[in-house]
């Protein structure tokens, strides 16, 4: 029997925890649950004797990995693994995996929740605008962006995308116009929705110059990561261009500065793109299955630190 820790500061929906528990138990393993921990010491203690762990955006750095003496695998129940020290894990022989696509629809639906809320003036009764006919540009074309594209077509939006790693032919095959670069995407989109991960190349990459290419009344949507935004430059741009608006599911570090722009800015109080029962069940159960498969026959299909 292997011990598998589920460590989540932001807990899964109860239904997902049940699903994960069943999956782990049915494979003859044992689940240890550490939810809503407030103190790092709780995590350091909990990891000390487990062979596997399931996390969300929990920070799994060298200190945690060093404290986890028996750890063989960490599965991030979700897409982004920027919170895990991949190299340190690799140096210790710990496999890191994610569960790509499992929570993508939830994030995509939230993009539209944010957009409708803003273009209808936060439901204050004043006449707003519609999404139909507007041009939506997707920066990157992974699982979330593909779901955003599907929903956008239902709204009657014109969708285009640019992805450094996805050839234009694959974007076009999904019925989406492929842009030749980021600049073209920003220039030709009334709404730009960001779906890039936080990497050394993308951190701070959403800057004044790029967003300033947007046409009049442009809306920037960020349901990806805080770090990709160059906050001082975006603040300056919002001040220079009173027509632009910014919507985000990632509360800016300088949120008070952004709030000065009134109804041209909105942030959810807490990141909640993937906070649905369905996404939690999908990602959590997938993570448990991946761990069971790894412990049973060494399967590393979703490894991200090869
Ligand atoms: C992801 O990378 O999967 C999403 O950003 C969701 O993250 P969360 O599990 O912290 O909500």
Image (cartoon, rainbow, N blue to C red):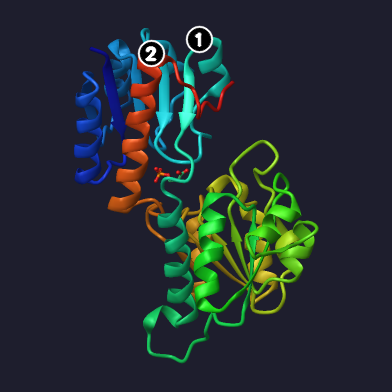
- How far apart, in angstroms, are the residues tagged by discs 1 and 2? 9 Å
What residue lies at 37% left-to-right and 32% top-to-bottom?
287
Indicate whether 37 appears above or below 108.
Answer: above
Q: Report if the beta carbon of the residue with label 2 is closer than 8 angstroms to ligand 1.
A: no
Q: Quadrant of the C terminus?
A: top right
Residue 65: give x, y in percent of width and height.
43, 16
Q: Secondary structure at mark 2?
A: loop
Q: Are marks 1 and 2 in contact (CB under 8 Å)?
A: yes
Q: Is residue 46 above or below residue 124?
A: above
Q: Is residue 243 above or below residue 284?
A: below
Q: Quadrant of the N terminus?
A: top left
- Whether 121 is drawn above or below 296: the answer is below
- What is the quadrant of residue 46 in the picture? top left
Residue pointed to by mark 1: 92
- Say which mark, if any, is on residue 71: 2
Residue 55 shown left or right of residue 181 in the figure: left
Front position in the image: 239 or 18: 18
Which quarter of the figure has residue 227? top right
């Amino acid at each position: 029997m292997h011990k598998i820790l589920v460590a989540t500061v932001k807990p899964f929906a109860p239904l997902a925890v049940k699903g994960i528990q069943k999956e782990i138990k049915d494979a003859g393993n044992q689940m240890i649950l550490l939810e809503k921990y407030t103190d790092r010491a709780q995590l350091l203690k909990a990891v000390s004797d487990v062979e596997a762990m399931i996390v969300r955006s929990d920070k799994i750095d060298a200190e945690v990995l060093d404290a986890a003496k028996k750890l063989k695998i960490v599965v991030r129940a979700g897409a982004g693994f920027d919170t895990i020290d991949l190299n340190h894990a690799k140096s210790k022989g710990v496999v890191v995996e994610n569960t790509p696509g499992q929570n993508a629809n939830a994030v995509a639906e939230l993009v539209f929740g944010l957009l409708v809320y803003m273009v209808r003036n936060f439901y204050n009764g004043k006449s707003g605008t519609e999404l139909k006919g507007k041009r939506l540009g997707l920066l990157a074309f992974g699982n979330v962006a593909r779901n955003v594209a599907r929903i956008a077509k239902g709204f009657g939006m014109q969708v285009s995308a640019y992805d450094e790693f996805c050839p234009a032919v694959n974007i076009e095959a999904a019925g989406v116009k492929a842009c030749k670069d980021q600049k073209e995407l920003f220039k030709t989109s009334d709404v730009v929705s960001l779906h890039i991960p936080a990497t050394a190349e993308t951190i701070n990459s959403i800057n004044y110059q790029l967003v300033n290419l947007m046409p009049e009344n442009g809306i920037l949507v960020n349901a990806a990561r805080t770090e990709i935004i160059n906050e001082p430059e975006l603040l300056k741009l919002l001040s220079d261009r009173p027509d632009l608006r910014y919507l985000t599911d990632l509360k800016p570090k300088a949120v008070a500065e952004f709030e000065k722009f009134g109804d041209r800015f909105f942030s959810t109080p807490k990141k909640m793109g993937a906070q649905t029962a369905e996404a939690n069940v999908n990602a959590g159960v997938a993570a448990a299955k991946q761990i069971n498969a790894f412990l049973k026959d060494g399967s590393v299909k979703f490894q991200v630190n090869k």
